[in-house]
Image (spheres, rainbow, N blue to C red):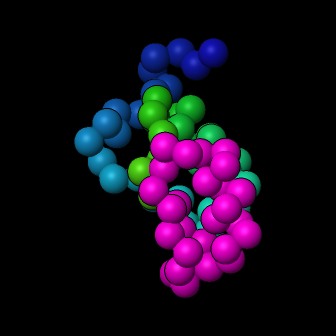
Amino acid sequence: MLTPQFILPLHSELVVDLFAGGGGASTGIGQAIGRAVDVAINHDPEAISLHQANHPQTMHYCSDV
């Protein structure tokens, strides 16, 4: 359980996970800011499919960065 002083106030910022794979970074980011990542990007369709399964509320793009 996180204490409130460690939650970052990013409720109106666009949060992007570049090089998204299984979603571990997105999970950690979500725990830190108290909400889901907005956008995930990866060039590999399989990585994006896996991330989408783990983070269905995030918008996903299969593209080079």
Residues rendered magenta in the picture = 40-65
Q: Is residue 33 above or below residue 19?
A: above
- The answer to whether 47 appears left or right of 17 in the picture is right
State the residue at coordinates (48%, 50%).
58
Q: Nearer the viewer, residue 53 or 63?
A: 53
Residue 62 image point, x, y percent? 55, 75
Residue 11 image point, x, y percent? 31, 36
State the residue at coordinates (60%, 72%).
42
Q: Nearer the viewer, residue 60 or 17?
A: 60
Residue 28 seen anywhere in this rendered image of the structure: yes
State the residue at coordinates (55%, 45%).
56
Residue 48 part of the magenta-drawn span: yes
Q: Is residue 19 above or below residue 27?
A: below
Residue 25 seen anywhere in this rendered image of the structure: no
Residue 12 image point, x, y percent? 26, 42
Residue 6 part of the magenta-drawn span: no
Where's the N terminus, which quadrant?
top right
